[in-house]
Structures are given as C-alpha cells and as structure tokens.
Image: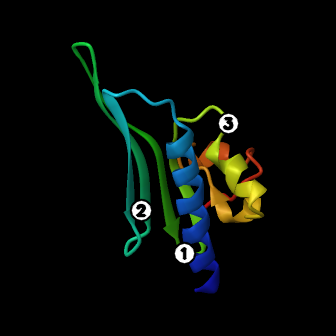
Amino acid sequence: MEKVAQYRQYVQKVLREYAEAAPSDQNVTVQLGFDTEHDHYLVINVGWIEERRIYGTVLHLDIQGEKIWIQHDGTEIGIGNELLALDVPKSDIVLAYQSPYRRKYSGFALS
C-alpha cells in the first residue's frame, strides 16, 4: 500500500501542475477531480468561448492495483513522461487509451 500512497501523491502533483500551467481564459476554467477513495483523477475544461460550449476531459488517470492507468491523455507532452520523471517505472504505467494489442509495443505495462 505504500507504493499506492506514493502514486496517489504523484498523480495529484502532476495533475495540479498541469492545471496551474494551463492557459487561462476567464470564460473557461480548468477543474480537478480527485476521488482518492476509488482512485480516479481528472482534469476537465469547462466554460464558453463565444457561443460554443467547452466541456472536455483533458486527463483521466486511475490507480488500479499498484499501477497507474492513463485512461485519457489530451496533453502534448504526454502525462506518462511526467510520471517517468518522478521515477515511476514504465512497468507500473498502463497506457489504457491504447488497445491491448498496441500496448505491447509501447514499452509501458500491458495491464
């Protein structure tokens, strides 16, 4: 469980940093969603640009078992790279947005 507790801290850290660095717009806000009981973590854009509604998940990470599952990554740099920089091993990061078949070529965990 110590590993999972550390991963919770890492995930929250990288999501907070992303949210703080996101371009600010008075009509669009970046919201964080942390469900630490069930280990679901989100970054969502919410607001309006002129007459167009903005609502979308930028990042969605889960912790399942002792691995970090990247369910959705809408960033340019790749949140997996941010986790690697924190010394999370590739074997503990699952690129869940890729099909199980393609994961084997990523160098990250299969599941």
The residue located at (72%, 47%) in the rendering is 81
For the C terminus, which image quadrant?
A: bottom right
The residue located at (51%, 69%) in the rendering is 64
Instruction: Classify residue 29 as left or right of residue 94.
Output: left
Label 2, secondary structure: give it. Answer: strand
Q: How is the image coloured?
A: rainbow
Q: Which residue is mark 3?
A: 77
Residue 53, by quadrant, is top left
Q: Do labels 2 and 3 touch, CB within 8 Å?
A: no
Q: Which residue is mark 2?
A: 40
Q: x, y (%) of residue 97?
A: 53, 44
Crowding around mark 3 (Cα neighbors within 10 Å: few <14, some 14 to 19, many 20+) is few
Mark 3 vs mark 1: give the one in front: 3
The residue located at (65%, 42%) in the rendering is 102
Identify residue type, mark 3: Ile
Q: x, y (%) of residue 40?
A: 41, 62
Residue 83, by quadrant, is bottom right
Q: Residue furthest left?
A: 51
Q: Which residue is mark 1?
A: 65
Mark 2 vs mark 1: give the one in front: 2
Q: Residue furthest bottom?
A: 1
Residue toward you, 70 or 46: 46
Q: CA distance from mark 3 to mark 1?
A: 26 Å
For the N terminus, which image quadrant?
A: bottom right
Identify residue type, mark 1: Gly
Q: Of label 2 and label 1, which has the lower sequence position?
A: 2
Q: CA distance from mark 2 to mark 3?
A: 21 Å
